[in-house]
Amino acid sequence: MEFRLIDRIRERTALAREDVRLGIGDDAAVLAVPPGQQLAVAIDTLVEGVHFPHGTAPQDIGWKALAVNLSDLAAMGATPAWALLALTLPQGDPPWIDDLAEGFARLAREHGVALVGGDTTRGPLCLSVAVHGFVPAGQALARSGACVGDAVFVTGSLGSAAGGLRLVQGRLPFDPGNEAHRSLRARLDRPTPRVRAGVALRAHASACIDVSDGLLSDLGHICAASGVGAELDLDALPLLPALRSVFGHAAARELALTGGDDYELCFTVPTAAVGPMQAALAEVGAHATRIGAVIEGQGVRAIGGTALAAMRGGWDHFGA
Ligand code: ADP
Ligand code: MG
């Protein structure tokens, strides 16, 4: 059963890359790193009921498992190349596996990522994806380079995935006939990793992180790693009209500050580099909004206001 499943995954994710000397089928993949490049490597696990709701479509699970990892590479300014997929499945259901592989492959093809190996075992539904990307030696975007005076930016919009999750969890029930509901749900199920933006930012940003746990929490990580504080203009937070129309302005802002799963990039830029940075993003069809500034001190606060509790709502699996 296992080998036939692996074959189904291999067929559906096939993508030729010259640097894959040996892919799926041997004991290990053999890969060639281009000269002058460093490898950026990341792994993330998705557990059913924890990282995606029970009943999520297999295509969406496959897509999201890769997306959250490509987002980590994007945050480093790395160009993705290879992935590994460790799958734990309650049963070997071929059509379900096909759909999962299709969702994974669709995003992998968009970014030229080859699936070069993995592992397949039986158990409660869980996926671990590891990704490998290239970054010119010494040019990776770390969390630790933010300087006082830098501007703080975020790509795309915030809070939509958390809004989608609220709808799935049902206090305000998901209505498939409601276009705003559908667009928020799509942000939860099919996040867009900002890969091209991350590569474009390499030459301009001083620090970068992807927003997986919520803006306050993740910008807080940049602040801690850089030894600085940050001041946010709460009126500048980019919110989708759908988020505001479904939840109202105040709740939408709260979701934008504390909701997870957006997979946007939050980054800092020296003010002199803001123009060139925006031009570089426009060239790859990306956009970012200025939401604040790096200041002396520590933690994240609202402009002219009090400290925003950094962990409030930020997702912490082992938190009290
Ligand atoms: P081994 O027992 O030597 O680890 P496996 O039987 O687990 O080998 O896997 C056989 C081949 O299939 C290996 O190349 C492995 O990387 C690949 N593989 C296994 N499971 C997956 C998967 N879910 N996705 C992609 N490749 C896989
Ligand atoms: Mg082996």
Image: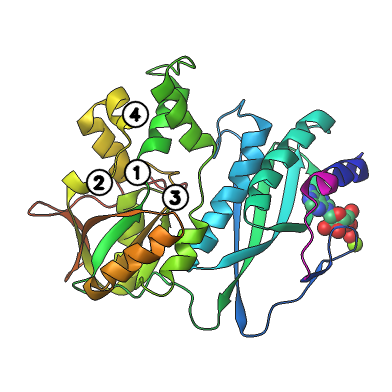
Does the magenta run of residues contain 284?
Answer: no
Which of the two labelled residues, at mark 2 and mark 4, occupies the earlier sequence position?
A: 2
Tell me which amino acid carries mark 2.
Leu
Whole-angstrom CA distance, mark 4 to mark 1, is 12 Å
Mark 3 or mark 4, earlier in chain? 3
Q: Determine which residue is flagged by label 3.
A: 212
Q: For the residue marked with disc 1, what is the amino acid?
A: Leu
Q: Which mark is residue 237?
A: 2
Q: Is mark 3 within 8 Å of ligand 1?
A: no
Q: Residues within 10 Å of mark 4 (few under 14, many from 20)?
A: some
Q: Which mark is residue 242?
A: 4
Residue placed at 36% from the left, 48% from the top? Answer: 214
Q: Residue at x 78, y 69 (%)?
A: 18
Are the residues at dot 1 and dot 2 in contact (C-beta closer than 8 Å)? Answer: yes
Question: In the rendered structure, which disc, 1 or 2, sits on the residue that comes first in sequence?
Answer: 1
Q: Position of residue 150 (x, y in %)?
A: 23, 70
Residue pointed to by mark 1: 158
Q: Amino acid at mark 4?
A: Ala
In which quadrant will I find the C terminus?
top left
Q: How many numbered callouts?
A: 4
- Nearer to the camera, 210 or 275: 275
| SS of the residue under disc 1 | loop
Q: What stretch of residues is rendered in magenta?
A: 9-18
Element assignment for label 3: loop
